[in-house]
Amino acid sequence: MKLSEILKSVTVPKSQFNKFGKFHYSTRDDMLSVIKPLLSANGLRLNETEEVVCIGTRYYIKSTASIFENGEVIAQSVGFAREPETKKGMDESQLTGTATTYARKTALCGLFSITGDEQDPDQMNSKDSKEELNPKHPKWKGAQEAIYNGECTIEQIKSKYELSDTNTTLLCLELEQVDAER
């Protein structure tokens, strides 16, 4: 599985620093500088698309990040961001650009299971959030084995851990590969 190996090896350093919030982060460009060479080396292609959607009374930028192999979508993730009504010092086109960049970054994070060792500033106030299970998590293999051996289901894993749609798909693909090898 090309994609599963890429997902295991993607590590994006948080080399940027926000002085106001006092946290490190990575930009979309930081992510792409790691992701694009891995995809290219494996014959895969990344495509990002955006559209404006209205939810309730607010407009959001919806970004879809897709990985293609031989012209077929093999994985996909969506990110949303809305423009603030106003932001001091920015004109309307800058507001849209900022929201678009954030939506794209969110979609890439979901698609490539990009997390960091440091707490995500967008989740700092969420005390009840579940631990995210991804291919880099030490319990990933154990979860696979427990599912494969019939000790639990993917639904039970999801009730214990935060598991993105991309990681759920990856877990299923890896289980199929283990089954084929046994």
Image (cartoon, rainbow, N blue to C red):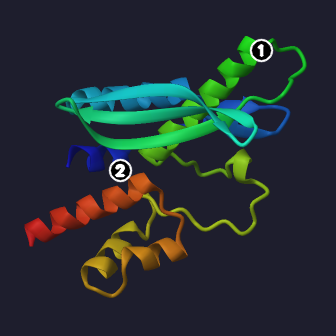
Rendered residue at 67%/65% (across/down): 129
> Which residue corresponds to mark 1?
92
Rendered-image quadrant of the C terminus: bottom left
Q: Earlier in the sequence, mark 2 or mark 1?
A: 2
Q: Residues within 10 Å of mark 2 (few under 14, many from 20)?
A: some
Tell me where residue 34 appears, x and y as whole percent: 42, 30
Please name whichever residue, 35 or 52, is drawn nearer the observer in this view of the structure. Answer: 52
* Res. 10 in view: no
* Res. 20 in view: yes
Left or right for 130, reference 174? right
Tell me where residue 162 appears, x and y as whole percent: 54, 64
Tell me where residue 130 appears, x and y as whole percent: 61, 68
Left or right for 82, reference 105? right
Rendered residue at 57%/48% (across/down): 116
**Discs 2/1, front:** 1
Quarter occupied by residue 134: bottom left
Alpha-carbon distance for marks 2 and 1? 39 Å
Q: Secondary structure at mark 2?
A: helix
Quarter occupied by residue 27: top right
Examine the rendered structure and indicate whether residue 152 appears above or below residue 169. Answer: below
Rendered residue at 43%/55% (across/down): 165
Q: Which mark is residue 61?
A: none
Please name whichever residue, 56 or 162, is drawn nearer the observer in this view of the structure. Answer: 56
Q: Secondary structure at mark 1?
A: helix
Please name whichever residue, 6 or 47, is drawn nearer the observer in this view of the structure. Answer: 47
Rendered residue at 28%/50% (across/down): 4
> Which residue corresponds to mark 2?
8
Examine the rendered structure and indicate whether residue 123 appears above or below residue 155. Answer: above
